[in-house]
């Protein structure tokens, strides 16, 4: 949150630098003494984990791109060459592929955390919207990256998804087809398509990194939300970011990396589809075209609607609706923990998302379609009906008087504010939150 | 402890969702039930059985290679660590058994020469059309990554190779197709090529269809994942490092946060 700068340059060089490019001041104010609510739980560590993952994906991806051939004839084999003949190529490639799954896993936890604790509510609307934008860019990046493998699933995923735009033919005849051919760079998915997918797959992560900077900046203006949703009132409600949250994030990141490494080294293809080890063949359609697990809920929504154009609209709307959540939620309080009615709807929403994920992998027929429609309907009802209505009629539980009270019990609020330990600068509330250029995020 | 328990719960949740998801995305998988076999390379400490890989190469070379290519493999791979590890002399000899088309030479003509370790495995057909023409219209797929290109990979290959049987009486077969219990749809273009004794084993292993199938499956698994042993070995070190690192981080975290807890305790006792 905005606070006075407490940075004291200690050397001549530090003073010289401080009056020219005050990066040490920025780091000190935003990532060392920055006050964070003391009650943040481990769900708040996923911002830092995501930052690690973004760096890891970009680092592995840059090296992979040195060996990858974006041509229809060589793409598949060049990846196998990486796996076989490039030093540590198998590690780079598996870390990158599993890393994409881990990225989405962490992002989904991060998003559901924000949803549960009302982190999108004022004054964090722009923070939330930037997060949604990152999610949208992630979807595009992951989709394009998956296509580069040029296996059967890659090729047919590109074919199916790009063909979605042809549904616009039912609005303006010919427009959809024209758009699809423009995207393909030809009359079918082929060489020009693969080339542009590769080009954009290399570009997008850097756009993501840029939006992440904005996301962290927007976070550092109001500061982190917290599990109670109660605003920070006194300095006893917060702890300095370093060492309290750097160490907590660090521990959580290592725990997360145990899962990550377990998959990379012992089950690298577990989350993938075996069909993608068959080289792309435009003449053979796989029996079931299934996206990667992280897209399944959206794929289920797409297929739940009988009309092609409406299905496409519903799928895009399912992501677009996330952007306007801050204005759909009418609740006066943030945290679902204190919302006795909404709580049930929230967990039902989680169940719907998981159910849609399951249904997205099934054949679109019979009961699967029926339940896809039921859960799709609830997905939208949750945002468009439950959020506005329940917020108005619900009587929230009594909120704790302060963050400190929620941690130490009610008597703490009447207790004199304890002196912070010497080494932390908790009660320093330095100001002037400047652009937080480092990639460390919590919202 | 509460924090540790919570973080463990989160990790367990991640692990659970990671474990549950592929079974979801494979739920739409087609085809009959495939029995799981015991393989020597099972994680986390498994290794390939060198003798089995060598036998598997023999089965591939004598039987499968008549129709199936393995374009991603070179003869040199047969001598590399983590694989069948044929001796250098054996690799050269195995390579030399194949006649490789090379060229063009100084007169512009292609010519045949014995294979070298740096050559790719010789493909049985010049192109896909030739392969189809020789196989009643069916294209024998390349086997380089076959062990990863089918659901349940090695288990499926073993089940398919041992799955040839007489069709049920009411089952309608298309001409030129063969009944296979493990193949999706049960009609496979590939005939049953393995019979007991078709490949000679010299190391005392019984020359049965079951052993051929197991050995060639192992060979195909290695071909698809030539660095599997290295992956497990590096993985073990990384996991040990991460677990120790996690313990250190946890204890450090506890030590750092104990300052806050001491302070809170002091504040409480003041009231």
Image: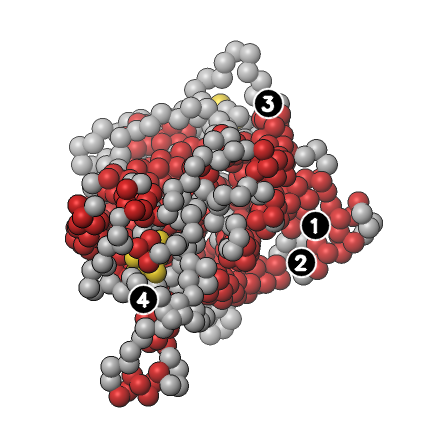
Q: Residue at x 19, y 64 (%)?
A: A422
Is residue A403 left or right of A184 when viewed as pictured? Answer: left
Residue B121: percent from the left, percent from the top? 38, 52
The residue that label 1 is drawn on is A165
The residue carrying pointer 3 sits among few (fewer than 14), some (14 to 19) or many (20 or more) residues within 10 Å by Cα, namely: few
Q: Does the image show residue A325?
A: yes
> Given the image, what chain letter belongs to the residue carrying mark 1?
A
Q: Which mark is residue A428?
A: 4
Nearer the N terminus, badge 4 or badge 2? 2
The residue that label 3 is drawn on is A367
- Helix, strand or loop at disc 4? loop
Is residue B115 left or right of A363 when viewed as pictured? Answer: left
In whole angstroms, how far apart are the C-alphas of marks 4 and 3? 60 Å
Badge 2 vs badge 3, beta-carbon distance below 8 Å: no
Q: Nearer the viewer, mark 4 or mark 2?
A: 4
Q: Does the image show residue A159?
A: no
Of residue B43 and residue A437, the one placed in the foreground of this image is: A437
A334 vs A197: above or below: above
Badge 2 vs badge 1, beta-carbon distance below 8 Å: yes
Pointers 4 and 3 within a single chain: yes
Nearer the N terminus, badge 4 or badge 3? 3
Residue A222: percent from the left, percent from the top? 46, 59
């Amino acid at each position: 949150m905005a606070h006075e700068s407490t940075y004291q340059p200690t050397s001549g060089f530090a003073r010289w630098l401080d009056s020219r490019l005050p990066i040490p001041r920025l780091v000190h104010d935003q990532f060392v003494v920055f006050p964070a609510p003391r009650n943040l739980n481990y769900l708040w560590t996923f911002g830092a984990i995501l930052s690690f993952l973004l760096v890891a994906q970009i680092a592995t991806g840059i090296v992979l791109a040195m060996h990858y051939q974006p041509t229809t004839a060589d793409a598949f084999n060049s990846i196998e060459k990486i796996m076989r003949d490039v030093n540590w190529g198998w590690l780079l490639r598996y870390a990158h592929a599993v890393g994409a799954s881990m990225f989405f896993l962490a992002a989904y936890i991060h998003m559901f955390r924000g949803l549960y604790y009302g982190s999108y509510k004022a004054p964090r609307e722009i923070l939330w919207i930037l997060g949604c934008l990152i999610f949208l860019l992630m979807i595009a990046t992951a989709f394009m990256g998956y296509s580069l493998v040029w296996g059967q699933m890659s090729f047919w995923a590109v074919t199916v998804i790009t063909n979605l735009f042809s549904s616009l033919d039912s609005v303006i005849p010919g427009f959809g087809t024209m758009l699809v051919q423009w995207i393909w760079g030809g009359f079918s998915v082929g060489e020009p398509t693969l080339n542009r997918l590769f080009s954009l797959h290399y570009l997008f992560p850097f756009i993501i990194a840029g939006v992440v900077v904005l996301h962290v900046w927007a976070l550092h203006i109001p500061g982190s939300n917290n599990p109670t949703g109660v605003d920070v009132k006194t300095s006893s409600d917060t702890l300095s970011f370093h060492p309290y949250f750097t160490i907590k994030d660090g521990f959580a990141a290592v725990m997360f990396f145990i899962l990550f490494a377990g998959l990379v080294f012992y089950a690298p293809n577990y989350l993938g589809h075996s069909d993608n080890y068959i080289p792309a063949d435009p003449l053979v359609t796989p029996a079931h075209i299934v996206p990667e697990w992280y897209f399944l809920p959206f794929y289920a929504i797409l297929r739940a609607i009988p009309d092609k154009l409406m299905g496409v609209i519903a799928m895009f709307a399912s992501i677009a609706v996330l952007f306007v959540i801050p204005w759909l939620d009418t609740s006066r309080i943030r945290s679902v923990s204190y919302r006795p009615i909404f709580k049930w709807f929230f967990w039902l929403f989680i169940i719907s998302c998981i159910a849609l994920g399951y249904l997205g992998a099934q054949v679109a027929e019979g009961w699967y379609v029926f339940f896809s429609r039921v859960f799709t309907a609830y997905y939208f009802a949750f945002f468009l009906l439950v959020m506005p209505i329940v917020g108005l009629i619900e009587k929230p539980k009594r909120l704790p008087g302060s963050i400190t009270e929620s941690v130490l019990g009610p008597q703490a609020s009447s207790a004199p504010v304890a002196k912070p330990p010497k080494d932390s600068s908790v009660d320093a509330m330095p100001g002037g939150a400047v652009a937080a250029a480092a990639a460390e995020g919590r919202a | 402890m509460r924090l540790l328990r919570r973080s463990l719960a989160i990790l367990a949740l991640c692990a659970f969702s990671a474990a549950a998801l592929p079974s979801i995305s494979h739920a739409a998988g087609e085809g009959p039930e495939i029995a799981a076999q015991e393989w020597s390379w099972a994680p986390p400490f498994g290794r390939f059985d060198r003798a089995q890989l060598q036998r598997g190469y023999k089965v591939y070379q004598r039987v499968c290679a008549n129709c199936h290519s393995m374009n991603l493999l070179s003869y040199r791979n047969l001598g590399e660590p983590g694989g069948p590890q044929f001796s250098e002399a054996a690799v050269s000899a195995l390579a030399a058994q194949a006649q490789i088309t090379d060229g063009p030479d100084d007169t512009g003509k292609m010519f045949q020469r014995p294979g070298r370790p740096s050559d790719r495995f010789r493909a049985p057909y010049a192109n896909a059309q030739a392969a189809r023409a020789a196989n009643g219209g069916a294209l024998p797929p390349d086997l380089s990554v076959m062990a990863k290109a089918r659901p349940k990979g090695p288990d499926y290959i073993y089940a398919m190779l041992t799955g040839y049987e007489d069709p049920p009486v009411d089952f309608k077969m298309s001409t030129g197709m063969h009944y296979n219990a493990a193949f999706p749809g049960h009609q496979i273009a590939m005939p049953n090529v393995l019979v007991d004794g078709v490949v000679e084993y010299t190391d005392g292993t019984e020359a049965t269809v079951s052993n051929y199938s197991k050995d060639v499956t192992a060979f195909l698994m290695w071909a698809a994942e030539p660095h599997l042993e290295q992956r497990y070995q590096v993985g073990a070190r990384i996991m040990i490092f991460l677990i120790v690192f996690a313990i250190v981080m946890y204890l450090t975290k506890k030590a750092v946060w104990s300052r806050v807890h001491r302070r809170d305790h002091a504040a409480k006792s003041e009231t």
